[in-house]
Amino acid sequence: MQEYIQQNWLEDLGILTTLICVWLNTRQNIWGWFWAIVSSGIYGVIYWQFKLYSDMELQVVFIILSIYGWYQWLFGGKEKTELAVTTMPSKFWLACTIIFVAFTVASGYMHGRYSDASLPYIDSSLTAISLIAQWMMARKYVENWILWISADFFYTGMYCYKGLYGTGVLYLLLSALAIKGYLDWKKSQAINHGFSA
C-alpha cells in the first residue's frame, strides 16, 4: 500500500510538471526547459519502477536535450539571438528516419533479449520518435508537434495497458496540447515570415 501511494504521488507530480513544461513550450516560454528537466527526473524514476527501460533512458537524454534547447532558444538564432520558429530543412528527414529505424531495432532487441523490459519494441519506437521530436523542438522546427501528437497518442495506450492510468490521461492531454502547440507555432512562423518579407 505504501509503495502504491508513493508511486501515485510521484506520478501526480510528474503529471503536473509535464503539463507545466508543455504548456510553456507551446507558448515558446524559455522556462519550459526548466520544467522539462524536473519532469524528466521524476519520470525517470517512475519508468524504472515499471520496467520501461527505454523510457527511463529517454528521460536522461531529455535532460541533456533540455539544456541544449534552453541554450538554443536563447542564442540559436543569427548572431546568437533568440531562435525563431522555422520549418525543418528537408535534408534532415532521411537522417531522422534512419535514426528512428536503427534505434527501434537495436534498443528493442537489446531490451527484449537482455532485460525484463515490458513491450520492448513499442517502447523503443516511441522513445525514438520522442528523441527526434525533442531535438526538433530544441531547434524550433514546427514539425516537432506533429511527431508529438503521434507519439502521445500511442503513449496513451501503452501507459493505460501498463496500469499507469494517470500518465495515460496525461498523454491524452499532451496530444491536445501538441495540437495547440502546432497551431500556435504555425502562427508564429507566419508572423516571422511576414516580418522578414
Image: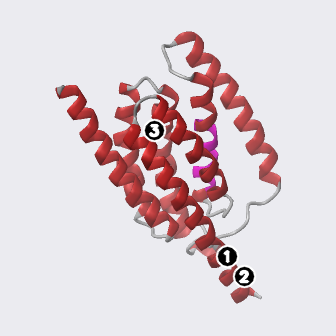
Q: Residues within 10 Å of mark 3 (few under 14, many from 20)?
A: some
For the record, the magenta segment spans: 127-136
Tell which of 184 and 63 is nearer to you.
184
Q: Is residue 29 above or below residue 128?
A: below
Tell which of 66 and 188 is nearer to you.
188
Q: Residue furthest top?
A: 113
Residue 130 visible (yes or no): no
Q: Is residue 163 left or right of residue 98?
A: left
Q: Amino acid at mark 2?
A: His
Q: Is residue 132 left or right of residue 57?
A: right
At a point 66% along the width and 62% down the height, the residue shown is 141
Q: Which residue is mark 3?
A: 60
Q: CA distance from mark 3 to mark 2?
A: 35 Å
Q: CA distance from mark 2 to mark 1?
A: 6 Å
Q: Is residue 183 above or below residue 10?
A: below
Q: Amino acid at mark 1?
A: Gln
Label 3 secondary element: helix
At a point 42% along the width and 53% down the height, the residue shown is 36
Task: Confirm or deny contact between disc 2 and disc 1 (CB under 8 A).
Answer: yes
Q: Which residue is mark 1?
A: 189
Query: Would you identify the image quadrant in which residue 139 lies?
Result: bottom right
Residue 40 x, y percent position in the rendering: 41, 44
Label 2 secondary element: helix
Label 1 secondary element: helix
Q: Earlier in the sequence, mark 1 or mark 3?
A: 3
At a point 52% along the width and 49% down the height, the residue shown is 65
Q: Which residue is mark 2?
A: 193
